Image: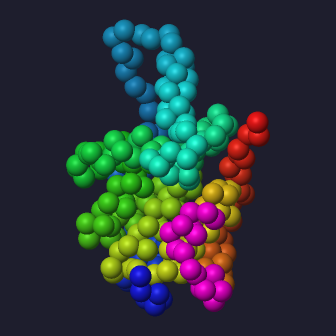
Amino acid sequence: MNRLHRPLLATSLACMLAGCSGPEAPAEPAHTAAASPGTTTRPSATPRSTSSDDAVLHREAAMLTYVCDAGAPACPEALVARSPQEAAWLLDHGYPSSVLLARYAQLSRTELNAMADAGSLAAMVVYGVRAAADGDTREGIEYVVAATQRGSIYGYYGLSAIFQNSPELMNIVEAGAYLRVAYILGDAKAATELQRRLPGLTPGEQAMIDERAASLYQTMAGARAPAPRPLQEEH
């Protein structure tokens, strides 16, 4: 990988990542629109009294997909939950499970875009990374940034991947810094992921990554309080 610190694609792109406002800030994708508090919806023909129970069951089923046998090669460590608390944390912060990633890989870009526009934080990030890989860099970054603004810590993994792999933006400092922001926001496993993705960093590169991450934490992440990822339960 070229270790030269390449400039950003455009000034507007840099503004977007820094959380700027004004004419140069990108418009949010369609999925960010939400119904106003006063909006009313028509009840279904068959009222359901168990909607809250269904939601709980759906959440529990989703949490189970994060469980993976220790050491299984198909389960990236950053996406693995070793406890119900860790599974809930992953779900709440927009991380896809390895099962969900496999499903997304089978979808066309149009299908994945529909899921992203429907509001799935995980789909927003995965779609954004795929769009950037297809050459639609600005659109891809818009989707991933929108996910981070809605609370996705996994979005910083996505931005790291874009800056690591996009020929237009390839930048080792940016790629490392976004993972470092995920670490600052509470994901202890992001540190291991950084070493896995970017092995052999020099002390100078590590210092630049830390300095850039500190800036991104203040600007893009709004210096919000960390939400620590639950540690693995001891047995």
Q: Is residue 84 visible?
A: yes
Residue at left offset 46%, top offset 90%: 4
Prevailing SS of the magenta stretch: helix
Q: What is the image's colouring?
A: rainbow
Q: Nearer the viewer, residue 186 or 144?
A: 186
Rendered-image quadrant of the N terminus: bottom left
Q: Work out whether residue 152 can be spotted.
A: no
Whole-percent x and y of residue 113?
29, 50
132 vs 172: above or below: above
Q: Is residue 46 above or below residue 135?
A: above
Q: Does the segment drawn in magenta span residue 165?
A: no
Which residue is at the front of the view, 10 or 207?
207
Does the segment drawn in magenta span residue 205? yes
Tell me residue 28's x, y (percent).
40, 59
At which x and y percent is residue 159? 46, 66
The structure residue drawn at horizontal position 71% and vertical position 52%, both measured from the top left corner, is 228
Question: In which quadrant of the rendered view does residue 234 lie?
Answer: top right
* Quadrant of the image containing the C terminus: top right
Residue at left 42%, top 10%?
Answer: 47
Q: Nearer the viewer, residue 97 or 25?
A: 97
- Residue at horizontal 67 percent and vertical 58 percent from the top: 188
Q: How many marks?
A: 0
> Taking 61 as reference, is 152 above or below it?
below
Q: Which residue is situated farthest in the right direction here?
A: 234
- Is 170 left or right of 64, judged from the image as shown? left
The residue segment tinted magenta is 191-206
Report x, y in % for residue 35: 43, 39
